[in-house]
Each structure stands twice: as structure tokens, then as C-alpha cells.
Amino acid sequence: MLYGLRAGEILKLVFFILLCQLAGGIGSYFTAPAIPTWYAALKKPVITPPDWVFAPVWITLYVLMGIAVFLIWRKKQYGKPRQKALFLFGIQLFLNALWSFLFFGLRSPLAGLIGIIALAISIFLTLRIFLRISYSAGILIVPYLLWVGYAAGLNFSIYLLNC
């Protein structure tokens, strides 16, 4: 046992972490080709971090998200609120991958801005319900919400600087 987890639970934890990383992989499919070309040519605000920062931050956030959703999955006694939490988590994970398509794939800061606003709202709703079911799971979502808020500010600035 790993910190009190049974083998099946460890596999489920790994599954959730990999699921979140998969969303990142889908996003990077659209992001990676645009970074040296389209994205490099955009005017960016001075608060834009170097490109190399994004990958380690997102990998870390996806691990935290995977652990958080695992903690919710384990709370079977919560019935319908748990189902709603898992559903909201799935929605925000979909919107997470969609943002990369909207911003980088379509090369549209405006579409990306609309997408990241929807993503931030869905993360906030996920956070609220996660906190009610598992405080620890909710706390693990906070850095994600903060980073997406920062990314939304960058997206908005890029839209203003390039429209």
C-alpha cells in the first residue's frame, strides 16, 4: 500500500493523472506548431513569461488536477454532488483542451479569450463543489484557477495588442 491506498486505488489515481495529462497533450498538439511561428510574431505584454515556463507549470497543474479528481472519485458517499463534481471536472478538462485549439489552432486571441473565460468559470464552479466534498481536492484546484486567471489576463492583453 502507498500511503494507505489499495492497488486498485493507485491505478485509479494514475489513470486520473494520465487523463489530465492527455488533455494537456491534446492542447500541445495545437500549441507546439504555433509557438515558433504565429505566437512568436504576436505582440505580448511585458508580464508574459518565457515560453519554457509553460510546460512545467502545466504538467504540475495536471498532476494536481488528477490528484484532486481522484480524491473526489473516492468520496462515493456523496452521491449526486459527487456525480455533479465529476461532470463539472470533465467539462472544465474539455474546455482546457479546447482553449489551445481556439487560441493556437485557430490562431485567434478573441476565440481564445472567449474560451478561457468559459474555462475559468467552469474551474471556479468545479472548485466550489470540490471544496464541499473534499477540502483537500478543492485546495489542489486553486493553483489551476490562479494560473488560468493569469493566462486569461495574458490572452486579453494579447488580444488588445494584436487586434
Image: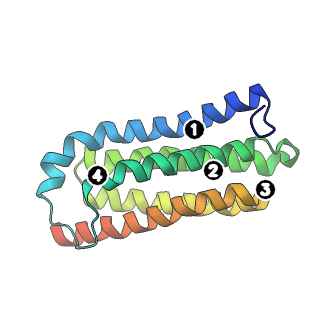
- Quarter of the rendering occupied by the N terminus: top right
Identify the residue shown where x is 34% and y is 40%: 28
Please tell me which of labels 4 and 1 falls first in the chain.
1
Q: Mark 2 points at which residue?
A: 88
Q: What residue type is labelled 3?
A: Ile
Q: Mark 1 points at which residue?
A: 17
Using the numbered discs, state the Cα–Cα distance from disc 2 to disc 4 in whole angstroms.
30 Å
Using the numbered discs, state the Cα–Cα distance from disc 3 to disc 2 in whole angstroms.
13 Å
Where disc 2 sits, the SS reads helix
Q: Mark 3 points at which residue?
A: 133
Q: What residue type is labelled 2?
A: Leu
Where disc 4 sits, the SS reads helix
Where disc 3 sits, the SS reads helix
Q: Tell me the number on the disc at residue 52.
A: 4
Identify the residue shown where x is 45% and y is 62%: 148
Any part of residue 163 in sight: no
Of discs 3 and 2, which sits in the foreground? 3
**At which x and y percent is residue 108?**
24, 55
Of discs 4 and 3, which sits in the foreground? 4
Of discs 1 and 3, which sits in the foreground? 1
The answer to whether the residues at label 1 and label 2 have Cβ atoms under 8 Å apart is no
The answer to whether the residues at label 4 and label 1 have Cβ atoms under 8 Å apart is no
Q: Is residue 64 left or right of residue 154?
A: right
Q: Depth check: 101 or 12 in front?
A: 12
Q: In this view, does 76 lie above or below 10?
A: below
Please tell me which of labels 2 and 4 falls first in the chain.
4
